[in-house]
Amino acid sequence: MMIRMPYQPSLLRLLHGVSAAVAGVASVTGFLIYNHYDGRFGRLPLGGSEEIIDLHGDLGGLLPWVVIPFALYSLTLGIRRLFRPADLGRMVGSLPAWQRLTNTAALLGLAAAVLSGLPLLRSMLTLDLRSSDRPKHWPQQI
């Protein structure tokens, strides 16, 4: 028995692949930055380089150029692949509804990363601490 494979347009595959590659490498370099500079929750013996932060920053600059065309494609030609209110009633036992929810959540996450990137970066690099930043207050922040 032959299973029929769905067709994915080449533009979708290209934009999706490039977005996934940039986001994946940005995640890895983000972890390497944490491991090299912070490590408050532990470190892995990976060595590291001062230049990793530059690569991570370059990827952050590249991300809008990749995500914006992907978002435009998703909101026009790919709109049927995004979550719809009618999917709420079909969530149980419907893999396509879950796939559309996952697609929409990923797109919203990428949009948030692009829109909050520069202010978020500045807030992460600040050395200011508040009294509520001490570890004994962490359970209340969760």
Image: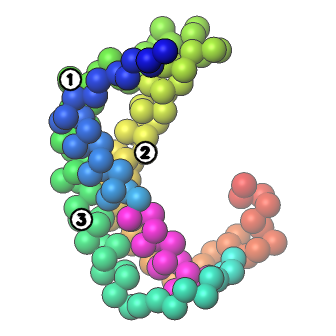
SS label for mark 3: helix
SS label for mark 1: loop
The residue lying at 37 percent from left, 81 percent from top is: 53
Pointer 1 or 3: first along the chain: 3
Label 1 and label 3: CA atoms lie apart by 26 Å
Q: Residue furthest front?
A: 1
Location of residue 24 in the rendering, given as x and y in whole percent from the top left corner: 41, 59
- Badge number at residue 77: 1
Label 3 and label 2: CA atoms lie apart by 16 Å
| Chain part drawn in magenta | 25-39
Location of residue 23 in the rendering, given as x and y in whole percent from the top left corner: 37, 56
Whether 53 is drawn above or below 137: the answer is below
Whether 89 is drawn above or below 15: the answer is above
Per the image, the residue denoted by label 3 is 61
- Secondary structure, magenta segment, majority class: helix
The residue lying at 20 percent from left, 24 percent from top is: 76
- Badge number at residue 109: 2
Whether 15 is drawn above or below 52: the answer is above
- Badge number at residue 35: none
Magenta segment includes 41: no
The residue lying at 81 percent from left, 72 percent from top is: 136
Location of residue 85 in the rendering, given as x and y in whole percent from the top left corner: 47, 13
Residue 34 horizontal side relative to residue 59, left or right: right
Please name whichever residue, 92 or 89, is drawn nearer the observer in this view of the structure. Answer: 92
Tag 3: amino acid:
Gly
Please name whichever residue, 75 or 136, is drawn nearer the observer in this view of the structure. Answer: 75
The residue lying at 49 percent from left, 15 percent from top is: 1
Neighbour tally class for label 1: few under 14, some 14-19, many 20 plus, Cα within 10 Å: few
Disc number lying in front (1 or 2): 1
Tag 1: amino acid:
Leu
Neighbour tally class for label 2: few under 14, some 14-19, many 20 plus, Cα within 10 Å: few
